[in-house]
Amino acid sequence: MAMDRFGASDPASAPPRKLTAMDLEIADLTEAIGALAPGRLSAQQLPEARAELEAARREAGDGVTRVLGAVEALLAVEAASLAEFRRALEVQATVILEACAYEDLAGQRLAKVERLLADLQDRLSQLAVRTGVEDRAVIETAADLRRRQLHLNGPALGGPEVGQAAIDAMFD
Amino acid sequence: MAVDPRMPILVVDDYKTTIRIVHNLLRQLGFDNLDEAADGEEALRKLRGQTYKLVISDWNMEPMTGYELLLQLRGDSALRSIPFIMITAESKTENVVAAKKAGANNFIVKPFDAPTLKQKMTSIFGEF
């Protein structure tokens, strides 16, 4: 092996070392993480999904506000005749019909987010299988503890866990 | 307890839409002295500043939840007798039990309808 003027071996002239099992594992892991596309997810796809959810929420709110406005206008109508009331009813009914279009837009946005989540679920599942990494134990944060102590669970999927009749029985 | 249609009612929810819906339903029932608050803290400030005869509150709000508001009311000698109806999407058994233990007069699960609201108010104030 060549030596430099200080007597140390010259790395440029050193023979290539054999790839170890660890080198191969690191390469495999790197490829698996790359397949997840974390850069694209965090810089583009997830911000876009959040923007879609925010827009859906805003459009739903706008739609409901218009519906409530029409309802309040109807409740406040003082018509001198049935025909006059009918005219007022038709005007507000049209507002309500038009406002209901929010469901179409919000639905399309939510569908986009659902597709991203399904894709993300696939990619994460493949990563978990390829790496064989086990999840770390969940550590309860202060926010988690507060939610648990104040019974903050949010609306249940599939309807209320306890129905009104059962609640009434508990309060009687 | 007789019902006075002019009694001041405080509706507490962080969703303006829900407040608007409840206010409209209360007006349909004949009540028109209605106020609102967006969370427990604002509600408590209002309750300590003026008289209300009924509180209708959501549970899940920040920085103070409706559950915490209820605990504050029942722990305050000046406010503890104000009737309190919880209207919430929090529908686990633990929520209902906690609300009852904390002194809620009644508990309505979202989504709810006008007859249910009237029934719960009737159970507190009598027929109207």
Image (spheres, rainbow, N blue to C red):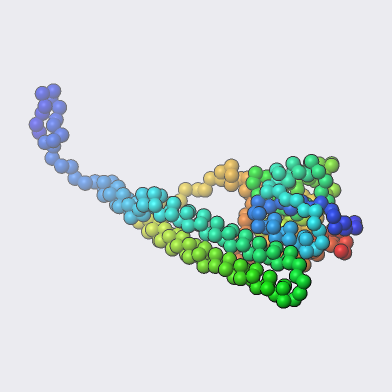
Residue A41 falls left or right of residue B122: left
Q: Is residue A59 visible?
A: yes
**Residue at (54% x, 60% y) in the render:** A59
- Res. B109 image quadrant: bottom right
Residue A70 falls left or right of residue B2: left
Q: Position of residue A39 (x, y in %)?
A: 36, 49
Residue B111 falls left or right of residue A27: right
Near-viewer residue (B97 or B21):
B21
**Residue at (68% x, 48% y) in the render:** B38
- Res. A5 image quadrant: top left
Near-viewer residue (A170 or B3):
B3
**Residue reaching furthest to the left:** A2
Tell me: residue A109, above or below residue B10: below
Image quadrant for the C terminus of chain B? Answer: bottom right
Tell me: residue B40, above or below residue B114: above
Q: Is residue A162 visible?
A: no
Q: Position of residue A51 (x, y in %)?
A: 47, 54
**Residue at (48% x, 65% y) in the render:** A108
Near-viewer residue (B46 or A30):
B46
**Residue at (58% x, 62% y) in the render:** A63
